[in-house]
Amino acid sequence: MRKTRTFIAVVAEGDVHDAALVAIDGLQSAADNVKWVGPENLHWTLQFLGDLDDAEVADVCRRVVDAASNVTPFVLAARGVSAFPKPDRPRTLWLGAGEGGDAFCDLHAEIDNRIADLGLRGERRQFVPHLTLGRVGRAHHGGPALTDRIAQLAAFDGGSQAVREVVVFASELTRTGPTYHPLAACGLGSSGLASSG
């Protein structure tokens, strides 16, 4: 049976999208072992669900539509560059959330509650709103230059964007990196699909 690598996210748009590219540019000279996220793939992660069959994908899309309809649209500000698991041992580089971060956590919780009984929850750690900028190569931890650059960008102002919809994406892994295909765009505070791909 065909499986689809699936995740749920909010697309980075406008000022936040542009600022994320500026942040990447600011980090690049401090690290040569990072796989940077392409401009077309920048997003705020809500849930990574892994490989799902067609019935599971359809069920997830229905549940995310329901969850999104219960959340009022809000404005999300991007603030500060940091890293998982921690800035002095960076593996995943990201742009964090400022104002609107609590609303984004509420959106995550609403979706998490709707899909919890499907057994698809992959993340057990506390949810941290973030927009992934790049991933450090497996054999590296970035070194002191990257750690210093992260510290310099800790107060980075990434602008803000309106959050009006959540997208369920399929991720296709290719030699040149992942390609994302929208499966359903679920409008906040509305009933039904905003659009579908």
Image (cartoon, rainbow, N blue to C red):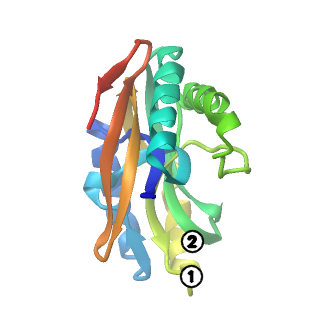
Q: Position of residue 32 (x, y in %)?
A: 40, 82
Circle 1 residue: 143
Circle 2 residue: 147
Residue 130 or residue 152, whichever sits in front: 130
For label 1, the crowd category at 10 Å Cα-Cα, with few meaning under 14, some 14 to 19 and many 20 or more, is few
- In percent of the image, x 66 and y 43: which residue is there? 127
For label 2, the crowd category at 10 Å Cα-Cα, with few meaning under 14, some 14 to 19 and many 20 or more, is many
| C-beta proximity under 8 Å, tags 2 and 1 | yes
Residue 24 or residue 131, whichever sits in front: 131
Q: Position of residue 73 (x, y in %)?
A: 43, 18
Furthest-front residue in view?
Answer: 1
- The answer to whether residue 163 is visible is no
How far is mark 2 from mark 1, CA to CA? 6 Å
Residue 174, picture quadrant: bottom left
Q: SS for tag 1?
A: helix
Q: Is residue 135 left or right of residue 91?
A: left
- In percent of the image, x 67 and y 51: which residue is there? 123
- In percent of the image, x 31 and y 77: which residue is there? 175
